[in-house]
Image: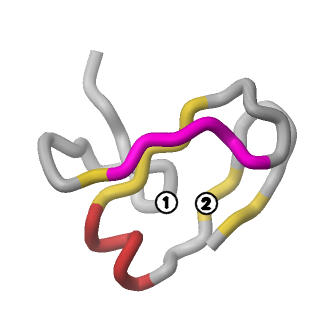
Amino acid sequence: MAKLCASCGTEVLEKYSQFKCPGCGKETIIRCSSCRILTTKYKCGSCGFVGP
């Protein structure tokens, strides 16, 4: 299964971060390096937590 950035939706292959949602800890959030640098917001699909 492809890993997709939670912010922009692009497929990530390298230089990305992956962590559990800080709000609920249930969903895994994946962010590409570009969105991390630009601090693009993401939203958890489980609890609706929005983070930078």
Query: Callout 1: few (<14), some (14-19), or many (20+) C-alpha neighbours within 10 Å?
Result: many
Viewport quadrant of the C terminus:
bottom right
Is 38 a magenta residue? no
Under tag 2, what secondary structure? Answer: strand
- Magenta region, residue range: 17-22
Q: Tell me: 23 left or right of 31.
A: right
Q: Is residue 16 left or right of residue 23?
A: left
Q: Which mark is residue 41?
A: none
Give the alpha-carbon distance from disc 2 to disc 1, as whole Å: 5 Å
State whether residue 28 is above or below residue 18: above
Residue 34, image x and y in percent?
Answer: 28, 72
The residue that appears at 24% across and 43% down in the rendered structure is: 11
Q: Amino acid at mark 2?
A: Tyr
Q: Residue at x 38, y 71 (%)?
A: 35
Q: Are marks 2 and 1 in contact (CB under 8 Å)?
A: yes
**Tag 1: residue type?**
Ser
Q: Secondary structure at mark 1?
A: loop
Q: Residues within 10 Å of mark 2 (few under 14, many from 20)?
A: some
